[in-house]
Amino acid sequence: MAMVKALFFDVFGTVVDWRNSIAAEIDSFSAERGLALDGQAFALAWRRRYQPAMAKIRSGERGFTDLDTLHRENLLDVLKDLSVTGLSDAEIDLLNMVWHRLNPWPDSVPGLTRLKTKFILATMSNGNVKLMVDMAKHGGLPWDMILGAEIAQSYKPDPETYLAGCRMLRLAPEECMMVAAHNSDLVAARALGLKTAFIARPTEYGPEQKVDFKAEHDFDVIADTMEGVADKLGC
Amino acid sequence: MAMVKALFFDVFGTVVDWRNSIAAEIDSFSAERGLALDGQAFALAWRRRYQPAMAKIRSGERGFTDLDTLHRENLLDVLKDLSVTGLSDAEIDLLNMVWHRLNPWPDSVPGLTRLKTKFILATMSNGNVKLMVDMAKHGGLPWDMILGAEIAQSYKPDPETYLAGCRMLRLAPEECMMVAAHNSDLVAARALGLKTAFIARPTEYGPEQKVDFKAEHDFDVIADTMEGVADKLGC
């Protein structure tokens, strides 16, 4: 692992707690307007539409479309399913921007700050650049560079997403380490030659969580927190 | 100016002192090898080949080629002009990477740190992403995002370079402010609707400097240092 120069981070779930961040905002929004939305259920319903929306783009059925746009389409579907009507475009935009305001897990900023002393830190997320930049400002995430889906014009786990990031940093895959709370993301990165670090986030999906309680492969680093990754990488 | 959300920074000359950084490394390199290179003259000769190299790409005569590659070609020409022979490829690569290790002007990091509390800070440089990331690590430059030539696949002052940056941040040109020590860069940005801030860097080229001693147009902000820009933007 001595050759690793850059760390690539999955963000939703690995660095930030999307479920509780969204639930809290939905609950406030709902209370202010006298609606009866369940923030936790809303967050999960919204996220459940994430992979299917990207699948159409991965398959080529649809051209590359950024995640803000996919999130908004999915939001309209969730609102329709819940028979929520009468929201203005501005209110829908405000709700959709909640993805730009997700809160980091408590260990994320301390761990990233330590890792930044030794490595280039880049996002390798399906979120678009503006989403990642706004989230970094909101949560104090010390990225050196925003890479990922929009830069590559492809969604993980398409190999091009990871490889475009390596190319832009002029690094070989084995000089980059993918850090994620999802086994599938790491398996995809490892198949391309990247090093891998797993962080367990067993509460990411709450009671609905079915997978990713632990590393299912012999990844290069396995830890419970971002600070644990920093410990194992000697930072 | 209340609508400005992001600041775009020219980097070579505006944020970092390329001339003295390169001269010092060339002088060390020369002394170690018993050569008789003049660091200051070398830096200026190398930089003099910068605009002509990009001109071929702007005109379409040559496809987009990153600045590391252009710098290396120009370095070989300078070495040839000075009849320096016998350097290994590794030595030439090491010299070429000096652009990744340029030192900031003393006011740059304090000023950027203040500006970062209120604005998105992005590079809008002709340097490629890796060059900018390495330089940021070297000098502690707190960028939120690396934009510019490689992201746009075009070199300033091509309008596409600035506009691709605005699009990636989902901002209108008037929500972005170009910060530069070069009148021509600001004139190009202003023509597209961006706000503008001029910083005087009267020693950038040393005794050879002919232009850019002061702002030649009524830019939105005119200052002598990066901290002066922060003062005028209320940071």
Image (cartoon, coloured by chain):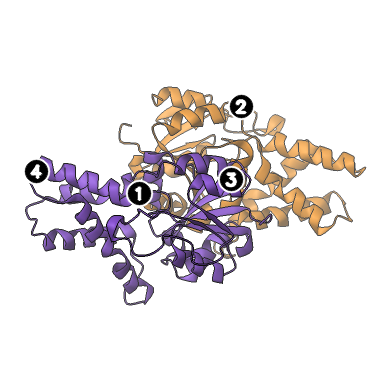
Chain colours: A orange, B purple
Instruction: Pinpoint residue A113: horizontal percent, then vertical percent.
Output: 49, 30
Task: Verify CB contact (< 8 Å) between mark 4 and mark 2.
Answer: no
Left or right side of A127 for B155: left
Q: Earlier in the sequence, mark 4 or mark 1?
A: 1
Q: Residue at x 56, y 40 (%)?
A: B114
Residue at label 1?
B17
- Circle 2: element type: loop
Q: Earlier in the sequence, mark 3 or mark 4?
A: 4
Give the label, 3 or 4, closer to the camera: 3
Residue at label 4?
B33
**Most distant residue in the right direction:** A34
* Image quarter hosting the N terminus of chain B: bottom right
Task: Verify CB contact (< 8 Å) between mark 1 and mark 3.
Answer: no
The amino acid at mark 2 is: Pro
Q: Looking at the rendered structure, which numbered label has been put on residue A106?
A: 2
The amino acid at mark 4 is: Arg
* Residue at mark 3 to residue at mark 2: CA–CA distance: 34 Å
Instruction: Pinpoint residue A109: horizontal percent, then vertical percent.
Output: 55, 30
Subunit under mark 2: A
> Is B54 above or below relative to A232?
below
Dot 3 and dot 4 within a common chain: yes
* Residue at mark 3 to residue at mark 4: CA–CA distance: 46 Å
